[in-house]
Amino acid sequence: MISSYYALVSLLAATRFSRMIPDHLRADLETVTQQRALAPQDSYVQLLARLDAAQQAALPERLQHYLSRRSYVKALQWLDNPDLPHHP
């Protein structure tokens, strides 16, 4: 019963965070970390400008921390699992 409660809380938190995340953020992070090809209409300058602008959105604190320090791999890992502990 307790594990079901924690699973539900985790699911609700992930759903809440996913509503706060701009749609393009994951794609931009995957592109800048070379997990996805750069779209023909984009440049890395535009991509980095969007990632910088995303910091102004109402994002979870940890995600803003990673974006502000340009820790894009950690930001992407956080999107996959917001419960991961922070490792400097």
Image (cartoon, rainbow, N blue to C red):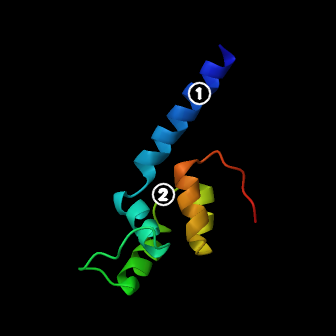
In this rendering, the answer to whether 74 lies above or below 52 is above
Mark 2 crowd level (few <14, some 14–19, many ≥20, 10 Å Cα): few
- Image coordinates of residue 46 in percent, x first then y, are 36, 82
In this rendering, the answer to whether 32 lies above or below 58 is below
Q: Which mark is residue 58?
A: 2
- The residue lying at 62 percent from left, 74 percent from top is 69
Q: In the structure shown, which secondary structural element does the residue marked by tag 2 occupy?
A: loop
Three-letter amino acid code at disc 2? Ala
- The residue lying at 35 percent from left, 73 percent from top is 37
- Image coordinates of residue 64 in percent, x first then y, are 57, 63
In this rendering, the answer to whether 37 lies above or below 58 is below
Q: Which mark is residue 7?
A: 1
Among the 4 quarters of the image, the one containing residue 88: bottom right
- Image coordinates of residue 85 in percent, x first then y, are 72, 51
In this rendering, the answer to whether 5 lies above or below 46 is above
Earlier residue among tags 1 and 2: 1
